[in-house]
Amino acid sequence: MTARHLIAATLGFVLCAPVAWAQPGAALDRLWAALEIPKALDIMRDEGLDMAEEVAVQYLGNTASDLWVRDITAIYEPETMAQVMRDGFSADLDGAEMEPLLDFFTSERGTQIITLEMTARRAFLDPDTEAAARDLIAAGDADPELLDLVDRFITVNDLVDYNTSGAMNTNVAFLKGLSQSEVFLMTEQEILDQVWNDAEGNRAETEDWLRAFLYTAYSPLDPEDLRAYIAFSESRPGQRLNRALFAGFGEMYNQQYHALGLAVARQLAGQDL
């Protein structure tokens, strides 16, 4: 069981209805919109629903009941996803300089970058598209200049470490929920051991996915724009935003994966826990 990559950096990660936010603020609202986080959450919901189908096959033999459907619908309820993410994001970003963030992401360059990231993330919902991007890099056919810039972007934003850590946390959350079933009883130490045993493989998988995704996203971008993006990411505001995005999405994923594990346990027990 591996978590979908958090891939924050400055990637905007749909709500059709307005939400009453816990921490309103004009600057935060503008940044939320500029990063296209509502669209990203919509994509993440589709990823989550696809993964839930895989989980049902793996753990339940695809014999999920109406209770499973209700649980999954609740886990990936759009307003809940947005509220959890927004709370974590705004709390971590509290006191940060907003003007540099807004200046960059409301600019023509910033808008193009977010659009490209969102387009690539949506495209990667298709397994064939993702596989083709991975194969391109594995075969050594990627543009070396662009790949070097992608690798620099990954390093500047600590994306491998952030995403590997995030995947481990969500796997722990899932297994803690799953262990409520007698079929998968585990102690906390057994859960941690299992997750750590998978850590090296998860890290390699994370790095491959990041390079394929970001190469796909930034292929249409002028190299100078990508260099400017890297420079912004190295700045204090850029680093602060990256951390806040991971904080918000990380909390959302942790809650979702724990709830998903509990949903499997409920199915296996045939009753509410």
Image: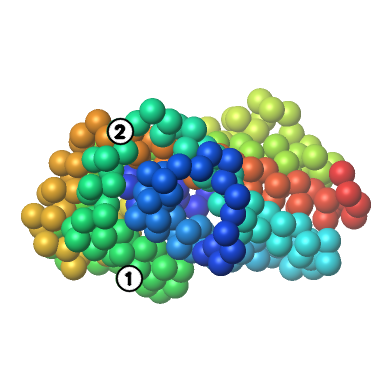
Q: Which numbered tag is attached to residue 132?
A: 1
Q: Which numbered tag is attached to residue 24?
A: none
Q: How far apart in space, not on screen, are marks 2 and 1 (Cα)?
A: 39 Å
Of 126 and 220, the residue lying toward us: 220
Quadrant for residue 17, please give it: bottom right
Q: Measuring 11% from the left and 62% from the top, which residue is drawn there?
A: 222
- Packing grade of label 2 (10 A; few <14, some 14-19, many >=20) is some
Query: Residue 105: x, y in percent?
Result: 27, 52
Query: Residue 260: x, y in percent?
Result: 69, 51
In the displayed structure, would residue 230 be above or below residue 59?
A: above
Q: Which numbered tag is attached to residue 97?
A: 2
Q: Is residue 249 left or right of residue 264?
A: left
Of 81 and 264, the residue lying toward us: 81
Residue 158 visible in this rendered orientation of the protein: no
Q: Is residue 272 left or right of residue 117?
A: right
In the displayed structure, would residue 242 be above or below residue 264?
A: above
